[in-house]
Image: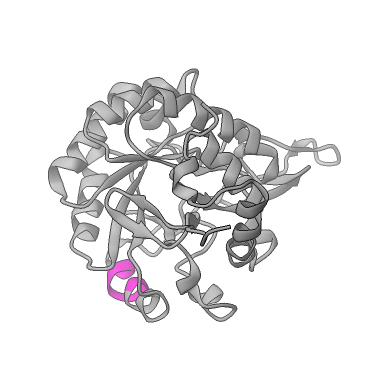
């Protein structure tokens, strides 16, 4: 078989491979840099950043479920200024490729402020606008669930920045393609999908939800079929690239998600179960490509259609 090509391209940015640790599951990369060379990764989506520092939701924030977990962390982060002055320079010591800056907010002005600040940071390649985090009581899910609100935030951010803008979509909607088309029409350069479907566990002993916030976002292998279905549907509805997210834990999952329509993937909960997950998936991709007769990985995007 001829030489294998694992590289992919997102809005003109070439990635050595399609594997990206998902925001909120990799911190700012510092802990993982002690385990393996981060430069093997395609990119890194760092922890969701807000205008002000956030402590996050009350504890407990995490509950196990069959084949996954529920989390309600609530965007805990040190705030935009500290991320730019401290976290990103440290990350650059370990990772010399463009990163994906995940931004959250409660109204359009919050997103614009953070996007403008991160647009000026040299090692930021893509701005990922998280209009879909289900764990914050104000804003968050309501923005991402309403096509017109999602479009308004997208348009405001696009007007303020030069770098590519990818909008992270919530699955907690009736028709995700409506929101996808709305943000595409508002100027989005790409989509990241899906964020976490809402779930709940109740402890029979206390008769109360296990997670203090009541509900939380489900992640892990249990959500892969939902993510694949939504990426498949959205690929048919839009022309912009999709980063596929949800339940990916092995090389075969990467190929499945790309066949559905993803140009690249983000790996989330798997990093929390196995810190070497992304490293191992990248190492296993060549044999998976050979198994399925794939020479150039980027050519399989949307191959199931």
Which of the pair 47/110 is nearer the observer? 47
Relative placement, left or right, of 196 versus 162 is: right
Q: Position of residue 59 (x, y in %)?
A: 62, 54
- Is residue 75 located in the magenta-colored stretch of the structure? no
Q: Position of residue 133 (x, y in %)?
A: 46, 41
> Residue 61 location, x and y as percent?
62, 51
Q: Is 88 situated above or below 34?
A: above
Q: Main secondary structure of the magenta part?
A: helix
| Span of residues in magenta | 82-88
Q: Is residue 30 left or right of residue 217?
A: left
Q: Residue furthest left?
A: 159
Expressed as whole percent of the image width and height from the top left, the position of residue 126 reads 30, 54
Q: Is residue 172 visible?
A: no
Q: Residue at x 79, y 35 (%)?
A: 207
The residue depicted at 52 percent of the width and 63 percent of the height is: 26
Q: Is residue 83 visible?
A: yes
């Amino acid at each position: 078989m001829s030489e294998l090509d694992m590289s992919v391209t997102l809005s003109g940015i070439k990635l050595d491979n399609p594997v990206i640790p998902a925001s909120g599951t990799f911190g700012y990369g510092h802990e993982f840099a002690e385990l393996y060379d981060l430069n093997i990764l395609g990119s890194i989506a760092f922890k969701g950043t807000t205008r002000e520092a956030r402590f996050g939701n009350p504890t407990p924030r995490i509950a196990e479920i069959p084949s996954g977990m529920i989390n309600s962390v609530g965007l805990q982060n040190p705030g935009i200024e500290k991320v730019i002055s401290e976290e990103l320079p440290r990350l650059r010591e370990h990772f010399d490729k463009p990163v994906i800056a995940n931004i959250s907010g409660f109204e359009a002005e919050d997103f614009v402020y953070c996007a403008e600040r991160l647009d000026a940071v040299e090692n930021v390649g893509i701005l990922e606008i998280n209009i879909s985090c289900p764990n914050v009581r104000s804003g968050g899910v309501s923005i991402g669930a309403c096509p017109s609100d999602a479009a308004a935030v997208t348009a405001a951010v696009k007007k303020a920045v030069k770098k590519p803008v990818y909008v992270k979509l919530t699955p907690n909607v009736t028709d995700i393609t409506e929101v996808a088309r709305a943000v595409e029409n508002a100027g989005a350069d790409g989509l990241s999908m899906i964020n976490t479907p809402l779930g709940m566990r109740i402890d029979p002993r206390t008769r109360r939800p296990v997670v203090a916030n009541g509900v939380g976002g489900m992640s892990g292998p249990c959500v892969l079929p939902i993510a694949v279905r939504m990426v498949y549907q959205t690929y048919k509805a839009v022309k912009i690239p999709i980063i596929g997210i949800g339940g990916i834990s092995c090389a075969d999952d990467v190929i499945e998600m790309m066949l559905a329509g993803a140009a690249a993937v983000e790996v989330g909960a798997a990093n929390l179960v196995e810190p070497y997950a992304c490293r191992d998936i990248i190492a296993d991709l060549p044999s998976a490509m050979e198994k399925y007769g794939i020479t150039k990985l980027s050519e399989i995007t949307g191959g199931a259609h």
